[in-house]
Amino acid sequence: MPETTPMVEYGVPIDAQTMVEPPDVAELELEPGHPGLGDEGYIRRRKELFGLCRRHRLERLGPPLIDYTPEETRIWRDVSPKLDELHQKYASRIYLQAKRALGISQTEIPQLRHLSDRLERETRMHLIPAEGPLPYRTFYSYIGERGFPVTQFIRHGSHPEFTPEPDMIHDCLGHVPSLMNHDYAELLTLIGKAVSITPDPKQVLALKRFSWFSIEFGLIQEDNETKIFGAGILSSTGEPITIRRGCRTCCSLFRRLVFCAGRLSSW
Ligand SMILES: [Fe+2]
């Protein structure tokens, strides 16, 4: 892409450097329209978990053990079985095998510290406590060191089927099981290393977009069946039923992702 070509996202020109390394956010921010706005108890809890997870991330303490509230457990018990029913029908075998091996409960919210220990033994991946979405460069720098950032807060109870931001349900039921797969773990690490060594923010955004179409919203072909692999679909109660198409596009993007990550990391 020529240097002078402006980057556009959702029809709006963007500055790649600002996208990749935005100013650090040291306090909880809920976006306009967030279902938790106006709920003082929810905001207080989110601030508490924000501070705790941020400290554990910056001081490299690993995921803190969380004493989940009855309301948080209620939401988990509401959403988790619904997702599991969809997973049994539509998820890839790689995901289902890993979810079983991790023993993720539908009734109790798992402790990410325990899941992290299990991943470490299986694929040498581990979990990084994240207070919320991290800047792309920060996010991928952890991945390059075999760490995967995960949140530990739960979405607002007024809309258990929806969250405007990645929460524990998205991260734990969408991303974590696939980290048990050795090939997947190696590929992720490769992408993280590629991001770490390129100074070009446009290349970081390109890798992020490849991740979007594979790790977040990828499909996979298994025994002539299209199965779901991406965490964004696996953690949604609505999308798995309608989204199992367009597999050829995703597979093509996935091959390009591997090619580009390999080239970058071999510099
Ligand atoms: Fe995600």
Image: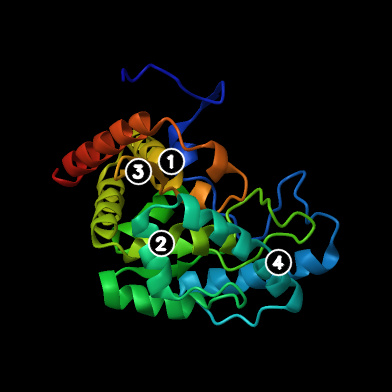
| The N terminus, quarter of image | top left
Q: Which of marks 4 and 2 is in front?
A: 2
Asked if labels 2 and 4 touch by Cβ distance under 8 angstroms, the answer is no
| The C terminus, quarter of image | top left
Q: In this view, does 197 lie above or below 116?
A: above
User: Could you tell me how far apart the alpha carbons at marks 1 and 2 are, in whole angstroms?
Assistant: 21 Å
- Residue 60 visible in the picture: no
Q: Which residue bears the numbered disc 3?
A: 220
Q: Which residue bears the numbered disc 1?
A: 212
User: Could you tell me how far apart the alpha carbons at marks 4 and 3 are, in whole angstroms?
Assistant: 29 Å
* Amino acid marked by disc 2: Leu
* Amino acid marked by disc 1: Trp
Label number found at residue 75? 4
Asked if labels 3 and 2 touch by Cβ distance under 8 angstroms, the answer is no
Out of 134 and 21, give the one closest to the viewer: 134
Q: Which residue bears the numbered disc 2?
A: 96
